[in-house]
C-alpha cells in the first residue's frame, strides 16, 4: 500500500500530483459547471423502500411523516446509507506501459483517468479507493472521502511505475473477497488476457451487487497494427517472440482483436456491466465525458421505466 | 526446319521471330525478383509488442496467406520483367490475322537470280533464264516504297555489290534486273544467297525473305551456307527448270587433244559426251584454224556408270608446225552454252640432229661417237617411229654447209677433230638459231676454239684434268659428279632417284673447265666443284659443252640409264624453245603459263580470238615466265598471247572452256535443298510450267505481318500494375 503522507513526497512528485489534480479538476468541474447538476447526485443516498418497524430497530430511521398518515411505524430504508464506496482497479502490468505515440503509454493515460474519476467521486462526497495491480497487488488505497484522501490517491498514481505480468482475474477476485458491501468498481485495463477467467471474476463481483465499469484502454498501434516490415514481435510481459510479416496478418489481427473486444462487450451487456473502449490518442475529456453523458442518459431512461412501474416508490 | 509449298492462305499463322534476339540475355533479369526475394525475406526487425495473443491466433493462417501473397507478387514482378525483356527483343509474328498495335512491318525481300549457263536451256524459243528474269522483274516491280529490296545474281562472285533499294527505286531495280544477261559461269548459288542473307540481316526489318529463281541444279547447291545471325529469313526456291531438259541435254564431258602433235603426223583428237536421250545421235563437228575438218554422229549409249553418253575421235594431221586452234561443235541440243569446246595445239616440226663423226669412230668402242650414235638411233626409232627428231651421222670429212639446211642440232663428240673452218661454219649455224652440243675434253678440239667460237670467251676449257686432286686432297683415279641444275629442261623431268644416280657418275679424265660469266649456265658440277656441263645462248641459238668424253675410258656416263634421256633432252632443248605445258583450261581456273625469260614478256597480254567479253587478263611478270589470272567473267574461247613489241606475231595461245559439270544437268530435289538450308525455313514454288506471279508476290510482301512488341510492353505494365495492387492489399 502506497498511502504515504504529504511529508513523504518529494517536490517532483508533488508537482506531478498537482498537475494531475489540476487536470482532473478541469475535466470534472468543467463538466459540472456545464450541467449544473451532478449526474452522480443521489448516487449514494438513494431511497430504496419502507418496511415495518421491528423491535430493536433504530428509532432514528422511523419515518414520522408516514406514521402521521398511517399511524404505523415504518422504517425508511436507503440503498446506501453511507457514501458510495468506489474502487478503481488500475492494471499496471508491463503491457500497460506500452505506448507508440506522443501521447505516452497506456498506464499514463489510465492514471489520468483514475485521477479524474477519484476527483469526481470525492468532489461529490463519495469514497474513492485505488488498487494498482499486475499479477499481484502493487498498491492499495482504501476508499475514503476528503481532499487529503484524494491526494493520497494521486500520490499512489504518480508513484506507480508499473509491474510485470497481468492477472486481471486475480485482482478482481481478491477485491471481491475484500468487499463487505456493495461497491462501485471501475476496472481500467487493456484486457489483453484470456477473457474467461476475467468473466468468472466479474460474475462473482456482480453477484455481490457491485456496480461495474470497465475502461478498456488500447494503444493506437494495438488497434491498427500499422507495422509494415517483417518483424520479430516480443511480448513485453513474457518475453515470448513471434517472427512474421505484419502486412500479411493485419486483417486477421484486427479481426481477432475485434472478436476479443466483442466478447467483452457482449459479456458486459449480459451482466449489465458498462464497457468503455478508449484509444490513448483520443482526448481524455472526450472519453470520460462521453461515458458520463451516456451513463446519465441510461440512468434517466432506467429511472423513467422504474417510475412508470412504481409511481409511489413503495413496494 | 519447315519445308512446304507457298501457302494458299497467305495469312497463315506463323512462328514468332525476334528482330533483336541478342537482347534475349535480358531475360536473365527475371532472376532479379527471385534473388531479391531470397535475400530480403528473412530480415526481421525487433519490435516489442503487447497483443501477441492475437498474433499467435493468426500466425499459421497468415503465414500460408503470406507465402501465397509473396508468390503472387514474385510472379507478377518476374512476369513484368520477362515481358519487358521480350518487348525489347522486338517480337514479331508472321501472318497474324490482326494488325496489332505497333504497326505493320516493312518487308525485306532479296531476289537471287540464277544466271549460270545451265539456265540457257531453251524451249519454244524462250530460255529458262529469260523466264526467271521476267519473274524477278515482276517481283521487284511489286515492292512498296517502304519495302527493302535486294537484287543479286548468282554469277557476280561473293564480293559483288548487290543492287538495293537504298540507292535505287523499285522501278530502277526492275530495270537493272531486266538488263541482266546469262553468264558463262558455272557455280554455286551459295555465295549469292549468303550475301543476300547478310544484306537482309542489316536491313533492320523483321520480315525477311529470299526468293531464289533457279533451275535447281545440284551443282548450284554446293558450297557452305552461312548460319543466320538473327531471325532466319524464309527462302523460296522457285524452280524454273524445263521439264525433260535433264534427260535430253547432252554436252562435252571431256576432250582429249593430242599431247605432242608433230608436223606431218596423223593424230587422234577424242571427245566424250555425257547425257542425251537413248537412241539419239548428236552430231559433232571439228573446226581447226577456222576450217571444218570433219563431222560425225555418235550414238548415245548407257555407259559403265549407268549414265547415257557417247564418245568419238577425229583423226587429223597438221602439214605445218606452229600454233593451231580450233573447237568442237555439238549440234542437236537445247543448251547452246556447252555445245562448243575450244582447244589449242602447238605442232612441232621434227628436229633434225646431226652427229659429226668419222667412219672409224662409229665402229670403235673407245670412241664417243660410237655410244652417241647408238643412243640416238635407239631413241629415234622408239615409240613406233614417232620420235620428235630425225638423226643422221655425218662424217667430218664429208660435212658441208648443205648438211646444216633444216638441221636443228649438231652434236660434236670428243675424239673427233673438226677443222677450224668447219667450226666457224657451225658457229654461224648457232648464231642463226641452231644448236651445238660439244662433248670434248679438249684433246681433239683445242679448248680456246671451243671457248671463243661457241662461248664468247666466257669459258676456259683447260687440259685434261685426270689425276687431279679430289676434294679430300688425295690424287684419285676419277671425280664423281656432284650437283645438277634440276630446273634446267635437260634435267627437269628427272626424278630424285635419277638425280641420285647422276651423282654416282665417274669422270676419269674431265677437262678443267672454268666459267667466267653468268651468261654461261652450269648444268652439272663435279665433286671438286668444277663445272663439267654448261650451256650458253649465242645469237639466236645455243651451245652446250660436256667437258669430258662419254666413252668408258673417259667416264661411265654412257653406262648410266640417264644417258639416252639426257642426250635427247639436251638436243631438244638446244633445238627449240620450251613449250608451255597445259593449254586448255576451265573458266575460273587460275592460269599459269611459263615463257622463256625475256624483256618482251613484261608486256604480254592475252586477247580472245574473235573478240568477246572479258578479253583481258591481268599479268604478273616473273623471272621464269608470265602468269595470268583467269577471271570468272571471261568468256570461253581461245586466247592468244601477243607481244606489244611485235603485234603481228602470236607468241602462244591457250583455250578456256565452260565447266562441263554445269551443262551436265542434274536437278536437286526440294527435300535435299531443304536439308542443305536446314537453318532456314524454306518454301518451294514449281515454276517449271507456269510462274504464279500473284502468289509469289503475295508471299514476298506478306501484308499480314505484325510486330508484337507493344502488346508485350503492355503486358509488362499490366503485371507491374498487378504487382502494385497486390502489394498494396497487404
Image (cartoon, rainbow, N blue to C red):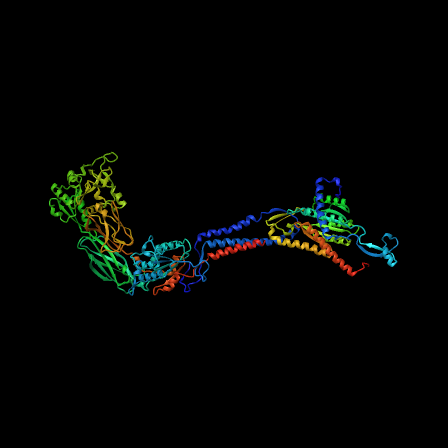
* Side of B405 where B340 appears, left or right: right
Quadrant for residue B435, please give it: top left
Picture coordinates of residue B317, whole percent (x, y):
19, 56
Q: Position of residue A286 (x, y in %)?
A: 68, 51
Say if B541 sits above or below B96 in the image.
Answer: above
- Pick the residue in front: A36 or B650: A36
Which of the image's four quarters has the N terminus of chain B? bottom left
Q: Is residue B341 among the parts visible in the rendering?
A: yes
Q: Nearer the viewer, residue A40 or B468?
A: A40
Q: Residue furthest top?
A: B473
Image check: B218 left or right of B447? right
Q: Is residue B386 left or right of residue B33?
A: left
Q: How many marks?
A: 0
The residue closer to the viewer here, B389 or B433, is B433
Horizontal and vertical percent for residue B655? 25, 54
Whether residue B360 is visible here, answered yes or no, is no
Closer to the camera, B353 or B178?
A: B178
Quarter occupied by residue B519: top left
**Residue A287, horizontal then vertical, whole percent:** 69, 51
> Compared with residue B471, is residue B42 higher up or lower down, i.e. above or below?
below
Amino acid at each position: 500500500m502506497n498511502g504515504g503522507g504529504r511529508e513523504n513526497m518529494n517536490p517532483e512528485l508533488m508537482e506531478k500530483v498537482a498537475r494531475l489534480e489540476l487536470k482532473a479538476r478541469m475535466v470534472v468541474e468543467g463538466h459540472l459547471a456545464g450541467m449544473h447538476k451532478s449526474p452522480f447526485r443521489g448516487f449514494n443516498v438513494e431511497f430504496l423502500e419502507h418496511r415495518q418497524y421491528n423491535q430493536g430497530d433504530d428509532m432514528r430511521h422511523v419515518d414520522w411523516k408516514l406514521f402521521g398518515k398511517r399511524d404505523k411505524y415504518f422504517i425508511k430504508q436507503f440503498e446506501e446509507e453511507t457514501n458510495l464506496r468506489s474502487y478503481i482497479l488500475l492494471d499496471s502490468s508491463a503491457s500497460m506501459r506500452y505506448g507508440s505515440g506522443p501521447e505516452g503509454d497506456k498506464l499514463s493515460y489510465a492514471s489520468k483517468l483514475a485521477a479524474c474519476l477519484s476527483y469526481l467521486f470525492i468532489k461529490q462526497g463519495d469514497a474513492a479507493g485505488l488498487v494498482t495491480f499486475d499479477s499481484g497487488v502493487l498498491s492499495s488505497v482504501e476508499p475514503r472521502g476528503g481532499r487529503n484522501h484524494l491526494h493520497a490517491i494521486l500520490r499512489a498514481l504518480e508513484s506507480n511505475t508499473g509491474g510485470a505480468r497481468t492477472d486481471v482475474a486475480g485482482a478482481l477476485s481478491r477485491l471481491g473477497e475484500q468487499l463487505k458491501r456493495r461497491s462501485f468498481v471501475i476496472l481500467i485495463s487493456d484486457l489483453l488476457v484470456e477473457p474467461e477467467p476475467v468473466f468468472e471474476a466479474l460474475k462473482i463481483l456482480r453477484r455481490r451487487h457491485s456496480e461495474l465499469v470497465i475502461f478498456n484502454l488500447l494503444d493506437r498501434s494495438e488497434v491498427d497494427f500499422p507495422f509494415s516490415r517483417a518483424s520479430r514481435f516480443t511480448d513485453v510481459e513474457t518475453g515470448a517472440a513471434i517472427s512474421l510479416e505484419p502486412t500479411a496478418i493485419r486483417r486477421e489481427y484486427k479481426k481477432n482483436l475485434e472478436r476479443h473486444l466483442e466478447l467483452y462487450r457482449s459479456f458486459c451487456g449480459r451482466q449489465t456491466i458498462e464497457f468503455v473502449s478508449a484509444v490513448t490518442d483520443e482526448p481524455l475529456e472526450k472519453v470520460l465525458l462521453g461515458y458520463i453523458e451516456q451513463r446519465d442518459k441510461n440512468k434517466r431512461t432506467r429511472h423513467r421505466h422504474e417510475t412508470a412501474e412504481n409511481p409511489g416508490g413503495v413496494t | 526446319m519447315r519445308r512446304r509449298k507457298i501457302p494458299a492462305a497467305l495469312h497463315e499463322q506463323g512462328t514468332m521471330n525476334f528482330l533483336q534476339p541478342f537482347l534475349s540475355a535480358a531475360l536473365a533479369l527475371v532472376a532479379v525478383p527471385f534473388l531479391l526475394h531470397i535475400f530480403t525475406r528473412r530480415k526481421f526487425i525487433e519490435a516489442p509488442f503487447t497483443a501477441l495473443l492475437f498474433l499467435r491466433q493468426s500466425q499459421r493462417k497468415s503465414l500460408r496467406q503470406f507465402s501465397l501473397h509473396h508468390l503472387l507478387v514474385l510472379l507478377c514482378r518476374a512476369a513484368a520483367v520477362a515481358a519487358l525483356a521480350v518487348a525489347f527483343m522486338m517480337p514479331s509474328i508472321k501472318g497474324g490475322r490482326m494488325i496489332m498495335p505497333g504497326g505493320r512491318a516493312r518487308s525485306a525481300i532479296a531476289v537471287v537470280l540464277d544466271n549460270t549457263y545451265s539456265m540457257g536451256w531453251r524451249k519454244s524459243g524462250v530460255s529458262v533464264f529469260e523466264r526467271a528474269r521476267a519473274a524477278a522483274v515482276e517481283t521487284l516491280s511489286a515492292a512498296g516504297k517502304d519495302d527493302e529490296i535486294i537484287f543479286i545474281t548468282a554469277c557476280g562472285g561473293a564480293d559483288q555489290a548487290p543492287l538495293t533499294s537504298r540507292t535505287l527505286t523499285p522501278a530502277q531495280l526492275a530495270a537493272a534486273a531486266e538488263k541482266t544477261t546469262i553468264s558463262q559461269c558455272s557455280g554455286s548459288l551459295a555465295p549469292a544467297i549468303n550475301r543476300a542473307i547478310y544484306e537482309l540481316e542489316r536491313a533492320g526489318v523483321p520480315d525477311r525473305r529470299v526468293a531464289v529463281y533457279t533451275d535447281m541444279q545440284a551443282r548450284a547447291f554446293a558450297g557452305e551456307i552461312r548460319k543466320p545471325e538473327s531471325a532466319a529469313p524464309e527462302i523460296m526456291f522457285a524452280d524454273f527448270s524445263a521439264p525433260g531438259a535433264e534427260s535430253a541435254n547432252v554436252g562435252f564431258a571431256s576432250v582429249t587433244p593430242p599431247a605432242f602433235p608433230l608436223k606431218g603426223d596423223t593424230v587422234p583428237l577424242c571427245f566424250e559426251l555425257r547425257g542425251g536421250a537413248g537412241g539419239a545421235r548428236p552430231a559433232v563437228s571439228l573446226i581447226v584454224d577456222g576450217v571444218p575438218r570433219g563431222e560425225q554422229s555418235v550414238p548415245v549409249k548407257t555407259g559403265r556408270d549407268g549414265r547415257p553418253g557417247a564418245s568419238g575421235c577425229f583423226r587429223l594431221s597438221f602439214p605445218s608446225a606452229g600454233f593451231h586452234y580450233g573447237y568442237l561443235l555439238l549440234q542437236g541440243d537445247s543448251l547452246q552454252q556447252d555445245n562448243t569446246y575450244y582447244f589449242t595445239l602447238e605442232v612441232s616440226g621434227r628436229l633434225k640432229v646431226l652427229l659429226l663423226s668419222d667412219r672409224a669412230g662409229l665402229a670403235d668402242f673407245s670412241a664417243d661417237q660410237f655410244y652417241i650414235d647408238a643412243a640416238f638411233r635407239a631413241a629415234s626409232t622408239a615409240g613406233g617411229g614417232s620420235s620428235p627428231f630425225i638423226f643422221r651421222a655425218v662424217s667430218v670429212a664429208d660435212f658441208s654447209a648443205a648438211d646444216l639446211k633444216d638441221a636443228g642440232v649438231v652434236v660434236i663428240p670428243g675424239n673427233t677433230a673438226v677443222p677450224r673452218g668447219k667450226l666457224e661454219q657451225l658457229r654461224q649455224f648457232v648464231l642463226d638459231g641452231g644448236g651445238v652440243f660439244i662433248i670434248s675434253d679438249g684433246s681433239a678440239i683445242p679448248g680456246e676454239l671451243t671457248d671463243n667460237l661457241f662461248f664468247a670467251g666466257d669459258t676456259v676449257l683447260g687440259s685434261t684434268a685426270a689425276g687431279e686432286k679430289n676434294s679430300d686432297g688425295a690424287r684419285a683415279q676419277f671425280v664423281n659428279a656432284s650437283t645438277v641444275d634440276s630446273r634446267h629442261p635437260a634435267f627437269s623431268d628427272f626424278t630424285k632417284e635419277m638425280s641420285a644416280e647422276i651423282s654416282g657418275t665417274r669422270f676419269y679424265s674431265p677437262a678443267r673447265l672454268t666459267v667466267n660469266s653468268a651468261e654461261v649456265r652450269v648444268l652439272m658440277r663435279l665433286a671438286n666443284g668444277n663445272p663439267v656441263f654448261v650451256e650458253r645462248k649465242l645469237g639466236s641459238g645455243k651451245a652446250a659443252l660436256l667437258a669430258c668424253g662419254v666413252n668408258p675410258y673417259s667416264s661411265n656416263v654412257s653406262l648410266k640409264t640417264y644417258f639416252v634421256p639426257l642426250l635427247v633432252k639436251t638436243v631438244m632443248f638446244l633445238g627449240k624453245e620450251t613449250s608451255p605445258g597445259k593449254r586448255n583450261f576451265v573458266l575460273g581456273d587460275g592460269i599459269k603459263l611459263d615463257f622463256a625469260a625475256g624483256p618482251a614478256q613484261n608486256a604480254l597480254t592475252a586477247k580472245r580470238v574473235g573478240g568477246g567479253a572479258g578479253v583481258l587478263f591481268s599479268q604478273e611478270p616473273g623471272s621464269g615466265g608470265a602468269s595470268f589470272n583467269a577471271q570468272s567473267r571471261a568468256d570461253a574461247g581461245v586466247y592468244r598471247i601477243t607481244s606489244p613489241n611485235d603485234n603481228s606475231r602470236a607468241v602462244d595461245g591457250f583455250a578456256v572452256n565452260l565447266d562441263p559439270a554445269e551443262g551436265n544437268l542434274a536437278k536437286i530435289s526440294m527435300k535435299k535443298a531443304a536439308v542443305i538450308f536446314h537453318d532456314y525455313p524454306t518454301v518451294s514454288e514449281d515454276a517449271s510450267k507456269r510462274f504464279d506471279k500473284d502468289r509469289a508476290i503475295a508471299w514476298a510482301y506478306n501484308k499480314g505481318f505484325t510486330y508484337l512488341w507493344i502488346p508485350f510492353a503492355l503486358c509488362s505494365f499490366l503485371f507491374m500494375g498487378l504487382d502494385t495492387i497486390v502489394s498494396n492489399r497487404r
